Each structure stands twice: as C-alpha cells, then as structure tokens.
Image (cartoon, rainbow, N blue to C red):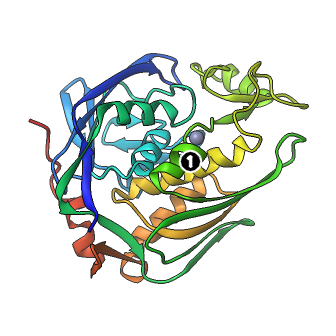
Amino acid sequence: MALQKTIKRPIQCSGIGLHKGRKVRLVLRPAAEDTGLVFALHGQDGVRFFKPSPDAVVDTAMATTLGFGSRRLATVEHLLAAIRGLEIDNLHIEVDGDEVPIMDGSSGSFIFLLRAAGFRRQNKPRRMLTLKKPINFQQNGKWIKARPSDRLTVDYTINFDHPLVGTQRIFVDCSPENFTRQVAKARTFGFMREVEYLRRNGLALGGSLDNAVVMDEYGVINPEGLRFPDEFVRHKVLDFIGDLTVLGLPMTGDFEVHCSGHALNNAFVRYLMDNRETYLELDVSGSRLSPEEAFSPVFAPVPAWN
Ligand SMILES: [Zn+2]
C-alpha cells in the first residue's frame, strides 16, 4: 500500500517572477495527512490559504495563473509539476508575491529544493484520481486523449514551424525517477519576436536567457545551447503534468497529447471536473470512491499551518 508523503522540514528559496521581474520568496512546509496542496498567499490583510482547482485558473496566456478573490498567483505549473513528479501529497506552499519564482525556467530547482527538505511517509494511504473510462478531448486540431491506468504516462507530440523544433515526440512513464531524469530540467522556450513584443507591452520583465530557451529564426540564442535535443517537447510534458495538478489531487492515466498548451490543458481539467460523475473516481489503495467522496477533502475548509 502506497502511503501519503510530505516533506520533512520547511525549506525556502528566492527568485524573480517572470512577469514583473520582482524578487519573490517561496517557502514549502510539511502538511498533515489528507491536507493536499495548500497555497498560503500574503496580501495587505495578512496570509490567506487557498486550494488549487481547475476553476481557480484565471489566465493561461503565457503561464498558468491562479486567482483567489483579489489575490493572484502566476506561473504555478513548474512547481506543481515538481510536486506531482516527486509524488508529494501534502504540502503548504507560501509565496510572498503574486508569482512563483521562475528560477531557471524548469522544475529543476524545485526538485532540488524538495529533495533537500527530505521526504516523510505518512500513515494514510495515497488518494489518486483515476479515470473511469477513456476520454478524447479535442479543440481545433489539438487533443488530449486519456485511458484509465494506475500509473501516469504521457505520450506528447508537438509540431512547430521552426527548423530547430519541427515535430518532436516523447513518451514518459512518470515515476519520480523518470520525471527527474527525463522531464524536470527541460526549460520553457520562446521566440525572439515574441520576447520583443512582450517587452514592449511590459510583460515577461523577468524573462532572460537565464530562465528560458530563446530562439531566433535559425536556432537557439542561449550560448549554452540545449539541455536535451528535444528539450521543447520535454518541457511540454512538464507543463502538462503541472496543469493536471491544479485538480488538487494526483491523477493517473495514460495520456496522449497533441500540440496542447496551458489553455487546452485547463479546458481539459475543467471538463473532467464538471463531468466528474462520468469520468473520475478516487482510488484509495485499490478501493474506488465516488467523485463526491474524492473531492470532499478538496472542498473542505483549508487548514492553516500551526
Ligand atoms: Zn512551462
């Protein structure tokens, strides 16, 4: 029986936010069994606590942004991917700004941080969201197909009209080892023409060659080059896993993804949540619970740390 997992001790880092370029502090703290993932966000009226959910996603333009009342938290996906990738069930995520620090544009720094904190097994069995039946979710020639499975696997294809990218495809069986080795270090990427446009519009102020792979018409501008020849599709797998994790519970399934992005990923998890009676059930060490039972902890009042 797989038991729930949290970290051993609080750990923190600082870095700049991608959009505003300001310094942000991130603190990760252990959380009790059945807490799930809880964001602790600072604001003028002190710290408040929120749980992720598909409905909390308020923007998917460049990154996945969560909104809770007047508070915003941008670029959550690389951190959530690291948490899901390492199979951490319970965690408090405290941020003193409105963006998760971008670090090097991958999940690598968060994996390093979480592993440095160490892991603690808890006493209750893991709760996994599983699919009841296959789903084929399509929009404008892009799709996410999924079949029930007790693992998380992602078969991802991208197709960019660029000499360095073109068509790339990868299959990842997302154990913590495989996630760490194959996916976690792949960086976000963009094109020079987009960077110029974003800068002119006061966006991506923290973006630089330190936290993104940037391409001109011919190749990569970054002097260090790529970390993997197919770093682009690997990063897309990373984003997909992070975007699934806004469900608030770890999900399993065999996923085939074609040219998706944050917007389609979010439309997909919203659709699953809206049709949870049809598609989802909760697996607790082999016994299946209904979606209402599954999500009751997610909808429960949010516990603060003490
Ligand atoms: Zn990303």
Q: Measured from the top left, where is residue 153 in percent x and y?
A: 55, 64
Comparing 277 with 5, the one in front is 5
In what quadrant does ligand 1 lie? top right
User: What residue do we see at 43% from left, 31% from top?
Assistant: 112
Give the vertical position of 164 relative to 253 (above or below): above
Mark 1 neighbour class, 10 Å CA radius: few under 14, some 14 to 19, many 20 or more = many
- In the image, residue 303 sits, relative to residue 171, either above or below, namely above
Where residue 136 sits, quadrant-wise, is: bottom right
Q: Which residue is mark 1?
A: 238
Residue 261 to residue 285: above or below: above
Q: Is residue 143 left or right of residue 14?
A: right
**Furthest residue in direction left, as rendered:** 306
Could you say where residue 9 lies in the image, as x and y percent from the top left?
21, 32
Given the image, on which type of amino acid does mark 1 rest?
A: Leu
Q: Is residue 122 above or below residue 15?
A: below
Q: Is mark 1 within 8 Å of ligand 1?
A: yes
Q: Residue at x 26, y 70 (%)?
A: 294
**Quarter in which the N terminus is drawn:** bottom left
Under circle 1, the secondary element is helix
